[in-house]
């Protein structure tokens, strides 16, 4: 299946009246992906305000007016991070993940952004880790939840 993709870049390309709807649609799309207990707080109190301040962004792909892929990004003086990436299973292996990751490199101004994932998702991400030669740099116990180790690639997480 060949898809005609439209990758949109958050508030800079979305009208103000559509921003709330699309940000809520992306939240609903990503809600069940994360078993991080604080995901809702992170999304609405950090990611969305960060988009408005210019320190964060969300790239997403729509097909037939449904979101099928999204990547949340953070770019500050101290951190360039892929916070979340997801492509619907139905649309995997079609280059969508590669396209949004490579567009994220432009926004983040690096091909080696910090990216973290729980240890139980490592198999899903191995092809991307290998493709971009991301290096494991830190392993944290119980960082985002108490059921897994958080694997950090290309950098370390700031301690709070």
Image (tube, rainbow, N blue to C red):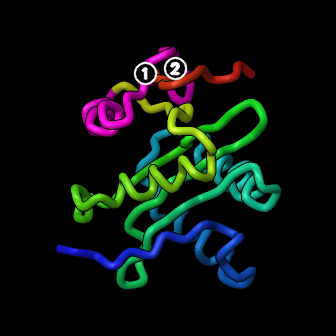
Badge 2 local density, few (<14 within 10 Å), some, or many (20+)? few
Residue 52 quadrant: bottom right
**Quarter of the picture holding the C terminus:** top right
Say which residue appears at 69% left-offset and 43% top-offset. Answer: 75
SS at badge 1: loop
Badge 1 local density, few (<14 within 10 Å), some, or many (20+)? some
> Is 38 inside the magenta-drawn segment?
no
Residue at which label 1 appears: 135
Disc 2 vs disc 1: Cβ atoms closer than 8 Å? Answer: no
Classify 33 as above or below 127.
below
Say which residue appears at 54% left-offset and 51% top-offset. Answer: 104
Viewer-side residue, 1 vs 52: 1
**Quarter of the picture holding the N terminus:** bottom left
> Is 123 inside the magenta-drawn segment?
yes
Give the percent coordinates (x, y) of residue 98: 36, 52
Say which residue appears at 70% left-offset and 82% top-offset. Answer: 15
From which residue to which does the magenta span run?
Answer: 120-147
SS at badge 2: loop
Say which residue appears at 55% left-offset and 71% top-offset. Answer: 8
């Amino acid at each position: 299946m060949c898809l005609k993709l439209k990758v949109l870049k958050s508030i800079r390309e979305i009208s103000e009246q559509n921003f709330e709807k699309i940000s809520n649609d992306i939240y609903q799309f990503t809600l069940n992906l994360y078993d991080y207990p604080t995901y809702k707080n992170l999304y609405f109190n950090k990611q969305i305000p960060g988009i408005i301040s210019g320190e964060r962004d969300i790239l997403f792909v729509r097909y037939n007016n449904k979101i099928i892929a999204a990547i949340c990004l953070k770019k500050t003086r101290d951190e360039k991070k892929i916070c979340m990436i997801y492509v619907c299973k139905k649309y995997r292996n079609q280059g969508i993940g590669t396209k949004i990751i490579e567009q994220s490199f432009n926004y983040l101004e690096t091909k080696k952004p910090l990216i973290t994932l729980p240890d139980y998702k490592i198999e899903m991400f191995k092809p991307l880790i290998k493709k971009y030669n991301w290096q494991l740099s830190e392993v944290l116990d119980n960082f985002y939840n108490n059921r897994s180790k958080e694997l950090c690639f290309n950098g370390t997480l700031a301690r709070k």
